[in-house]
Amino acid sequence: MKKKQSVGPVETKYFKFAEPPNEMSLELGGKLGPVTIAYETYGELNSGKTNAILVCHALSADAHAAGYLEGEKAPGWWEGMIGPGKAFDTEKHFIVCSNVIGGCKGSTGPASVNPATGAPYGLDFPSITIADMVEAQRHLIDYLGIEKLMCVAGGSMGGMQALQWVASYPDRVRSVIPIATTLKHSPQQIAFNEVVRQSIMADPAWREGNYYQYGQPEKGLALARMIGHITFMSVQSMEEKFSRRLKNANYNFKFDADFEVEGYLRYKGDSFVKRFDANSYLYITKAIDYFDLSGERLAPEGREADPRFLIISYRSDWLYPSIQSQEIVRALKRRRVDATYCELRSTYGHDAFLVEMDEQQALVRHFLDKTFEGYEVVRTYDI
Amino acid sequence: MTSDALRLDYKIIYDAVEPGSRVLDLGCGNGDLLYFLARDKNAKVQGIELNDAAIYQCVRKGLSVFNSDITTGLIEYPDQSFDYVILNQSMQEVTNIDFIIREALRVGRKVIIGFPNFAYIAARFMLFFRGKAPMTEALPHLWYDTPNVRCLSINDFRNFCGEKRLRILKAYYLGSKKLLGFWPNLLALNAIFVLTGESEATPCEFSDEKKGERC
């Protein structure tokens, strides 16, 4: 059943641009080039090129949003949302997902080889922002021949990219779906990211970022990810998932993982080390902290056309609480932008946008129907 | 389905809204009214609704809705953002009515308010002869599970408009199936008022004004 609704086998492709001397200029100064972007596409671009949707990933995900890569058992990270007959319907839409720059999943990042030295960039990698990630995506979208995206969607940091698209290229986006995200990080969110960064940098194996010939700062990176996982869950989802259950029958008084929750975090931390670059974690968390589209920046006065918005938050998400989505709503109301906002019930916390599919699917599907067919869809609905 | 099949209060509001208007519906429910306004009157509509199941219905119809309560729903909108702000069957469910109507008149040129009439004859009978909290077609809830927190009659609301210097542009009195012409405070189940802010006194522009006004 699941396989049947899936896009099935997929492959990651690579797009290279900004070859020197035409390097990409970065928001905070500095240049980057050449730049490689790893991306996947699902569905077919129609002849008018009007059905393209860009899906943006969160902090640690990648271009592999749906389907199955050769030799892998697990599907892409948003398999529940993307596929034939799903909210992002590959029978109707052409879906693009790319790995952010600064990442380590095929796009250029601190672990990539610096052409100037022939060694990995490490901390020589320039500071990047969410706007730079979007700028790189814009190059990809140009390359794919898409003038105007039907929609840009994403959760968490993916939602920031969706919002940044509106700020950077309002006339190239018809609609946006920011989920479980914010216009700017609060001090609490910055604080969590700082603790995460400190845990990496406090590991001697980090070596000021020059660890590539020695191996990852595994302890620090695993600890960083453990902290992250706590913030992605809710009190209730942790209670349901672990309660106070023990791994073995008794407490062992040896600082091993007594409780299931400890074992879970250790497992998540250890497996993360195998798949994610520590410096990428530093760069990307900084990019998230620098992101700030508050005030007039999202929807400035006097702008001609505004994309339509579907904003979704989750009630149990305390990392990106609903009040931050309501801030987006307020910014849009000030400009009378056409928008829908819904706070969904879920106990999964911040993770909900990746696992809680029914309502999210229904909202996205109907919202896209209207975006796709224009206001005509209102005329055909039968009560 | 055409607008003729709409329930009576929707039909009246539907007819009252001019084509091409910008409309904000506070407590838009499943969006039936906004849907018809958008479809047949080319209105630019926005809903505000607290109930998530109702929001899904609205989005299914292609409508734009904010998940919010009525009190915070108007915040941040610039002055005169809408031609009409609708508060149909939702005003009696909030406590700070004065504030909400002020805000609605700031955000909209006209405000359409529909509410159940607590002085309806059957309600009076129920209270007077049976000594029980009134329940009618327009007040269907038992006292312990009603969403209503404000109990008002048509006369109460008219007095309120006078005191607050709100101009009544039009008033409609609703029976079970059709509009009523006389003794509204006694015979109407529901009332719908169209208000505007700019006013000296409260001239009543409706013809049935004098008939049974004090009932």
Image: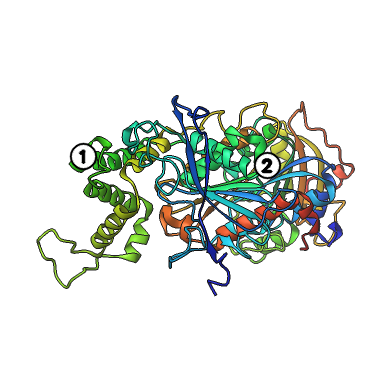
Q: Which mark identifies residue A87?
A: none
Label 1 Cα neighbours within 10 Å, binned few <14 / some 14-19 / many ≥20:
some
Residue A202, numbered circle: 1
Q: Tell me the residue at 78%/63% (across/down).
A: A382
Is label 1 in a helix, a strand or a loop?
loop
User: A142 or A5: nearer the eye?
Assistant: A142
- In the image, farthest residue toward the right: B207
Residue B2, picture quadrant? bottom right
Give A9 or A262, whichever is nearer the viewer: A9
Q: Is residue A271 above or below residue A223?
A: below
- Which residue does the numbered mark 2 point to in the structure image? A148
| Chain letter, disc 1 residue | A
Q: Determine whether the residue tagged by mark 2 lies in a helix, strand or loop.
A: loop
The spot of residue A198 in percent (x, y) is 25, 39
Category of crowding for the residue at label 2, using alpha-carbon neighbours closer than 10 angstroms: few (below 14), some (14–19), many (at least 20):
some
Give the image location of residue B127, x and y in percent.
65, 61
On screen, residue A65 versus residue A381, left or right, reads left
Identify residue type, mark 2: Lys
Does label 1 or label 2 sit earlier along the sequence? 2
Which residue is rendered at x = 48% and y = 47% of the image?
A99
Q: Residue at x 70, y 60 (%)?
A: B123
Quadrant showing the N terminus of chain A: bottom right
Q: Is residue A329 visible?
A: no
Mark 1 → mark 2, Cα distance in angstroms: 45 Å
